[in-house]
Each structure stands twice: as C-alpha cells, then as structure tokens.
Amino acid sequence: QPTGYRNFPMVPRVVYGKGSFDQLGDILMPKRKNADAPCIFLVDDVFEETDLVARIPRIFNDLIIFISAEEEPKTDQVDALVEKIRSDFSEPPSGIIGIGGGTLLDLAKAVAIMLNNTGNSSKYQGWDLVQRPALYHVGIPTLSGTGAEVSRTTVLLGPEKKLGINSDYTVFDQVILDPDLTHGVDKEQWFFTGMDCYIHCIESLNGTYLNAFSQSYGEKALELCKEVYLGELAPSESREKLMMASWHGGMSIAYSQVGVAHAMSYGLSYRLGIKHGIGNCLVFQHLSEFYPEGVALFHKMKGKHGIDLPTGICADLSDCDFETMTTVSLSMEPLWENALGPGWRNKINAEKLKAIYRKI
Ligand code: NAD
Ligand code: ZN
C-alpha cells in the first residue's frame, strides 16, 4: 500500500439531543482558566432579545457579542473582533463559543485561531498555514446544512479572495447539536442552507475523489435529505434528521471535495456577494449536464416546497464581470478535478461557464 494518506482531525467531542444546549455551562466549567479569562459567546443577532440569551451560561466577566449574519464573514471583521477581545481583557479568553448558522460558526473558528496566532487573518487563507493551535472553541449550530460544525475550514472573504483557512486547528474542540435550536428558521433559509448539504452529497458522491469513507457518509446524508425534503416528517423529526444530514454531509466532503456548483457559486458570491446557500441553488439548477439525477431531484424538492429562485441575477453584468466570475471559479482547481477528473481542463472552459452564468 502506498503511504501518504491524509491524516484528518475530527471534532473530538459532541453532544447530541433536544435541549442539550443547557449542558453548555457544565461543559465550559472545566475549561475556565480563572475568573479573569472569560468565555466569549459570538451569537447570531437574530437571537438578541430571545430566551436563548437567558440560557447562555454567562458568569464572571464573560462577554456576549451579537453579530449579524447578513453578510458572509470577512477577514477584517475577524481581525477587529480579535483586536477588541485583546484590548478588553487582561487575560486571553478561556474559550470562544459560536452560536448560529455557518456564518457565526466560521467567525468563531477564525477568531479562536487568530487569538493564538500573529498578524492578520488574510495571511492564513489557504491550506495548512496556521502555525499554532487555536484557543478552545465550541460550535453550536442553529441552522442545518453547511457542515461548518464538522469541517476543517472557515470560509472568509479577504481583500483579494474568498478562501477558507483550512487547517487541523480550525476544527471545533466541542460541538453541541441541539435540533431544537433550529426551530424558527424561515422556509426559504431552511431550504437554501439544507440544499447546501444536499449539493455536498451530490458533488461528493459523483466526484472522482470518492472513496468508501466519503461514500458512507455521503449516502447517509443524501438519504436523510430525501426524507426531510421529500418525505412527510413531523417538524421536530425533520429538524433532527437535517441536523444529522449536515453532519454527515460535512464528513463526506472532508475526505473528498465539492464540485461544479461550489466552484461556480464562489464566482457568483465573489462578484455579487450572493450568499453560499442560495448561490449554490442558483447554479445547481442549471447543472443537469454534470449531475442529471441530482438536478432532477432538486427541482422536485424545490417544487414540493414552493421555493422560487430569483431570476435575472446576471442580466446586467458586463463582459468584464463574467470574466472575473469565471476566473475565480476556474481557480478552484481541486473542485474541478474532483468533478471532472484529471483531464478537467479539456472538459470545461470559460465560454461554457459564461453560458451557464448567463442563465442565472
Ligand atoms: P447564515 O449563518 O449566514 O444564516 C442565514 C440566516 O439565517 C441569517 O439571517 C441568520 O440570522 C438566520 N438564522 C440562523 N439560525 C436561525 C434560527 N435558528 N432561527 C432564525 N433565523 C436563523 O447561513 P448558513 O447558510 O448556515 O451559513 C452560510 C455561511 O456558511 C457562508 O458564509 C458560507 O461561506 C459558510 N460555509 C462554511 C462552510 C465550512 O465548512 N466552514 C461550509 C459551507 C458554508
Ligand atoms: Zn457548501
């Protein structure tokens, strides 16, 4: 057997169950260094003035920072948060706890990394550039689908690129999966973020990087997505299953890669600021050439839930804009290689991508 297989980290501790959020206090207690080393809770501002805030186990000089998920996380935003935490406290925090969707989870990961590393966060966008372990960090998803709770990346929009900080230190030390926290997400958001998971499965299972490890997770996640979006589940069961679909979908791409929809969605998002979930859907609907069965099922799920995707998104773009989007997209080489194989450059080109973008 050849050696040199990737040695991936996984989330070492996870609690699963309805109401498990209330164990957070007990989980944090042994991690508290002293009364001056606070726990910092980064919380989606959609929860401001909800009863979830009262359930946050805040003691000593702990701090809750509410953050809007309106825009995707930026390197500047991470640097400003780190600067604030450093200047507000005499000691480094005991831990960073992210509570929210993919946006807040990614911010928590990035802040925890940057509190223990020097310079600006944009310096670490890429693969394995982080030198020192992150501060203890906990992820608590309130929206299911991205797989950010299990992944070894945190996707940031930087001055030059939208790219993840991919490293072994990015992975959460602890995750709390409480399906009740996803109660109250509106239907469109539930669909778009859930489709991120569905598309992870389709891209992983149809990719050339597929192996039995990824396949086992991808097949389970796909099965759960079908139950959630095409079955007739009770709402609470549906929330439980989508939370586990997200987890498995994330695990599936850990050992493989995403594909065409993600590569093209990055281009859309870079130029137009379109968010990840909806961006994936906008692209994926036009990818039947690459994923015939997956796209057909997508249309079925979309129809069942009465979801309308916006149209004319790219109508006013210039040639130069299309050029930017295709360049960003084609630079995601591992995604194309996973999707189309080692000869991918002969199978896809800028003109073909532009034709797809024009349909959006
Ligand atoms: P999000 O975190 O951006 O949130 C979307 C909306 O849902 C926001 O308005 C938010 O306030 C709201 N929301 C969240 N939880 C809610 C709840 N319980 N009730 C009501 N509203 C709620 O959405 P997302 O799709 O989860 O995350 C997208 C982000 O995740 C992007 O920045 C993307 O780059 C990132 N991402 C990261 C990874 C990774 O592996 N690190 C993977 C995929 C996507
Ligand atoms: Zn995704």
Image (spheres, rainbow, N blue to C red):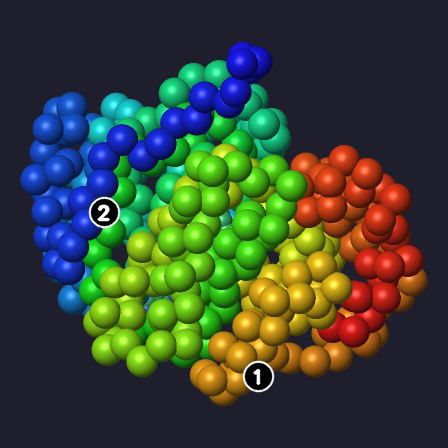
Which mark is drawn over residue 173? none
Please tell me which residue is depicted at 14% across the width and 45% down the height of the picture. 24
The x and y percentages for residue 95 are 26, 33
Name the element at disc 1: loop
Q: Where the N terminus falls, by quadrant?
A: top right
Per the image, the residue denoted by label 1 is: 308
The front one of 175 and 57 is 175
Q: Does 32 appear above or below 163?
A: above
Horizontally, residue 282 falls left or right of residue 170, namely right
Where 324 falls versus 124 (above or below)? below
Instruction: Tell me the residue at 15%/29% (across/down).
Output: 32
Answer yes or no: disc 1 within 8 Å of ligand 1.
no
Residue 28 % position (x, y): 15, 36
Q: Is 346 on the left-hand or right-hand side of 356?
A: right
In the picture, measured across the screen, residue 149 lies left or right of residue 290, that is left
The C terminus sits in image quarter: bottom right
Q: Which residue is mark 2?
A: 176
Count of marks, rendered view: 2
